[in-house]
Image (spheres, rainbow, N blue to C red):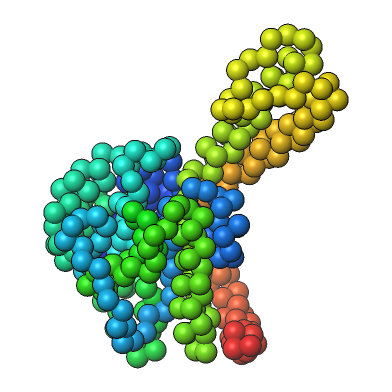
Amino acid sequence: MGRGDGSWTTIESDPGVFTELIEKIGVKGVQVEELWSMDKDTLLQMSPVYGLIFLFKWVAEDDKRPTADDTTGTVFFANQVIPNACATQAILSILLNIPPGAPGVELGEALTDFRAFTSDMPPDIKGLAISNSDVIRGVHNSFARPEPLVPDEDQKGGKDDDAFHFIAYVPVGGTLYELDGLKPGPVALASGLAGEHDWLERVGPEIQARIERYAASEIRFNLMALVGDQRARARAQLEVAQARKAAVEAALSGAPPPASPVPGDALPSDPSELQGLLVSLEDEIIRAGESLASENAKRERWRHENIRRRHNYIPLLFNMLKVFGESGKLDALIKAAKETQPAKRQRQRE
């Protein structure tokens, strides 16, 4: 359960969590995907790509790169003032930089009003506005795991505790920016970019260079993309293929073909070419249908995973231990668990 005391809880870094979080804020037409490759072709398969989110272990470094002046309001940039809000702030940094009227994207009332309200604010005040937003904080905290014993803020962190940080990479007005809430402003990485192909080609080397700086001591990185709703993408591909198939079938039968869903699409006049196109479209319909089914199944899997994340299993575990104790089996289970620990630790070190 989320808290009502104004604090922000830690949430899991997971595309299913982030996608549902975005939807609960009121945004439609986007989702988050985990990436295993940074090559441009892989990213273009999920087009449109609105931004990337990079998670890494934070280490202090002397970054002398200049930051851009954000007073013009061209780029939405907010300083991070709440540590546990880092993931949500990286997501907002992308969402609030999506151009108004982007096809297929509805920002929703909450974020539309928030963007308008904070448009003239400096980055530090924007950060405070995020931290004080009841809507954003409430949705964020709704993904907190149940706290079995001690709230996070009451635990004493040791010197070996790891601090992980999220930053966003977004294209705005032909310029690729790195948005890190711990910096005073956006860092411009490349300018004069013509479109999606350009910025995706430039962002890969930037992230790879950052990974290589830490590679000697750290292997835990996570990269996600905020992309268009892949169900809508697959559905559109399916509808276009079905409409083109109907046009080809009409042409083969001699009937007047319906208008093509693809502007400028001209069907061949040769019957053998039409037949070949028909076979190709049938294959395309199958692939698009499979893709749509896969995306729907993924959303359902995410929904179930998020339900399990929120569920409090502590009473169940407590009663199981109680039953084992009453039946005289608990001591043997504890002994067996202790005996397996050295092997588990060894595997973790390897």
Residue drawn where x is 77% and y is 21% of the image: 269
Nearest the eye: 12 or 101: 101
Residue drawn where x is 37% and y is 63% of the image: 191
The total number of labels drawn is 0
Q: If the image is split into quadrants, where does the C terminus sit?
A: bottom right
**20 with respect to 282 (left or right):** left
Quadrant location of residue 344?
Answer: bottom right
Nearest the eye: 247 or 193: 193
Residue drawn where x is 58% and y is 44% of the image: 295
Quadrant location of residue 226?
Answer: bottom left
Q: Extreme right residue here?
A: 272
Residue drawn where x is 20% and y is 43% of the image: 113
**207 with respect to 110 (left or right):** right
Quadrant location of residue 35?
Answer: bottom right
Place of residue 229 in the rendered image (x, y in percent of width and height, measured from the top left): 49, 43
Q: If the image is split into quadrants, where does the N terminus sit?
A: bottom left
Place of residue 123 in the rendered image (x, y in percent of width and height, measured from the top left): 19, 64
